[in-house]
Structure formats: structure tokens, C-alpha cells
Amino acid sequence: MRRTRLVAVALVALVLVGWTAGDAATPAGAASVRVVSHGSRSHPEVALTFDDGISPANCRRILATLVERGVPATFFPIGEAISLDRAFWRLVAEAGDPVGDHTWSHPQMPTLGLGEQVAQIERARKAVEAATGRPILRVFRPPYGAYDATTLGAASQAGFGTVLLWDTSDRGTSPRGAFADMVKAAEAGTDGSVILMHCGPNPTPWLLPEVIADYQARGFDFVTVPKLLGMTWSPGPTASITPAQILDGLSPLPLTQLGGPVAGPNGYATPCATPSATPSPRPTTRTTSSPTPKPTPQPSTVGSPGPSSSGIGQSLRPGPSPSPTPAASPPTLDAATSDTTDLVAAGPLALLVLAVGLVLALRRGRGRARGAR
């Protein structure tokens, strides 16, 4: 009996030590950061969000559609991609759309240490503020929706009290997705939804007008992320910008509904790894040095954008289209449903279960020994 008690005491002590160590390892401020994937479910409003910025041409096409239709949105560019078209990000700010933080190089944040995660967020913040001339929106979106307690601590240390995920996605980075399926997925939002899209793959400029029309027909209003989440935020000075000014001679839509650069293992496509050498602020479609065959374009079953006074949705001029790259690894967390995640208690709880199990096993063994006598 004495031996059993000593083992039980030792195991309980081990659990307490592990629990304390887990709490000590939690970065300061992590508990104060809120993780959200949607806004209030009591108002018919949704927020369009656009990540990455790895295709300057498609970024301009997206902003032109938003401006033409008077729809606000929120952008989360990769810091490295901003240099591809710095003039575009100034236009985003002048249009009054918020720009948040999406890291410098789009890594899987949980694979990095605290200092590295802070550096990723801080470096991206500086790039955004230098390009837009405005303070960044203090909302951080982790690449792939992947985060841990260290990520929350890093966000807190960098001055970001909100980590934003999403509950609706157009799945536009899927290299094998059908266009009609992407439209259907993007239109699946409800009250308070955060809709994830990307400034990169070709489907986004094609499906955006249809998605906007669908939500408006259902009575939804489009709002920015700070408006959706009840945050205090000011766009600063705005300017009257026309779609034609944004496009600057660029064709209003990509040549195909599918294809285009998508996020690779490092977060951005190979063509966008280096800054554009073109001096003009107008971006041009870029191709890889070793192009791979593009998937056959699939006709839309929901209708293509119609003509407009600004030229968006009109016949396209021929032009090159970049080849698709493999899609990035899936999120390590369920970004569509997780509001908060307890990432600290799992280890101590496992130790506690183990301790109880061992004590019970020792008692059972002692009882069998007595019976054998």
C-alpha cells in the first residue's frame, strides 16, 4: 500500500509540474487576443476579404469591380508581394478599404518560434504602412488559418488584438476546382460571414461580380472587417477613383476562368517571388520560366459578368496567363469553425489520465497478489 501511495504522489506531482510549465510557456498576452471567424449572426451583412496579392493584375481587376459596384472589402497582403505593385496598395487605401496583416512571407506560423512569428507580423506591418501611407488595420490573419498559443502571443506583442479566420471561402486556390463550384462555395455565407478570397488565382475576378449580385439579391450589405467586428477604425483621406484608372489599360478579366498563380508551399507563386522590373505602375500578367499545361477552361454555369460602362465584363483582349501551381498545405486548424482554441491544457490532461490509469493498475495488481496468497 505504501508503494502505491508513493507512486500516486509522484505522478500527481508530475502533473502539477507539467501544468505549471505549460502555463509558463504560454506567451504573455496570448489570452487577451480574440480569435474570430465571423461577425454577429443577427445582422444581414457580410465582409469580403482578399488575401496574398501575388497577382498584381488580378488585384487591380478585383479592386476595379469593387469600386464600380460601390462594395467595400478588406485586404490581407503578403508583405513580400506588396513590392510587386506598390501603386496598387496606395489605390486601395485611397478607395477607403482597410489593409490588415498576413505575415511577410506566408509561413506556417506554428512551425516558428515566438521571435520569428513576431518578426513576420512586424515586417509585414511596416511594408503595408510604407506602401499605403496609412496605419495598418490591427487585425492579423495567419496563413492557412494555422495558429497556436505562440501565434496569439506574437500577435499580442506586435499590437494585434484580433486574429481573423473565416467561415466561407470561394476555394479559389484549388487547382482542380470547377468554376461553378467556387461560385457556389463563395455564396454559402450567412449573417455575419467572413468570405475568404485571394488576389492571385484567375477565378476571383470572374466570380466576384456574380457573388456580389447574389448577396445583394438576398438582402445582404457588404461591410469592412472593422465594421463587421465593431472595431474603431478610420480609413483616412479618400479619393474618387474610377475603375478605368485602376485598370490603366489592363483587360478587365483574365483570359481564362481558371488557372493563374496560387499560393505554393512558400505562400506565393514562383512568378511573384521577385519584384516586377516593369517601371510602369500598371501590372502585366506574368508567366513562369517553365510553364506547365493549364487546365481546360470550364464555362460558367451561373453566368459571366455582363458589360458595364467601365468595361468590366466586356470582351477580353488576348494575353498570356500564368500556369497554376500546386495548392498549399491545408490549415492545421479548422479555420471555418474555430473561434477560440485551448492549446495549452492538452499535455497536462494527458498526464493526469496517465496518472489515474497507473494508480488503478497498481491497485488491481496488488489485489490480484493478495488473492493469489
Image (cartoon, rainbow, N blue to C red):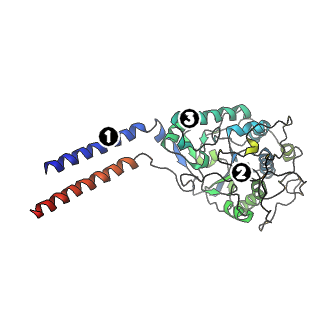
In this view, which residue lies farthest toward the bottom? 301
Of callouts 1 and 2, the N-terminal one:
1
**Element under disc 1:** helix
Q: Name the amino acid, label 2.
A: Val
In this view, which residue lies farthest toward the left? 373
Q: Name the amino acid, label 1.
A: Val
What whole-number distance in Å separates the C-alpha atoms at marks 3 and 2? 25 Å
Tell me the crowding category of disc 1: few under 14, some 14 to 19, or many 20 or more residues within 10 angstroms, Cα based. Answer: few
Of residues 355 and 299, the one nearer the viewer is 355
Tell me the crowding category of disc 3: few under 14, some 14 to 19, or many 20 or more residues within 10 angstroms, Cα based. Answer: some
Quarter location, residue 90? top right
Q: What is the number of the mark on residue 359?
A: none
Q: Which residue is mark 1?
A: 17
What whole-number distance in Å separates the C-alpha atoms at marks 1 and 2? 45 Å
Q: Position of residue 293 (x, y in %)?
A: 79, 57
**Element under disc 3:** helix
Of residues 341 and 239, the one nearer the viewer is 341
Q: Which residue is mark 2?
A: 262
Tell me the crowding category of disc 2: few under 14, some 14 to 19, or many 20 or more residues within 10 angstroms, Cα based. Answer: many
Q: Is residue 315 above or below residue 67?
A: below
What whole-number distance in Å separates the C-alpha atoms at marks 1 and 3? 27 Å
Of residues 204 and 360, the one nearer the viewer is 360
Q: Which residue is mark 3?
A: 116
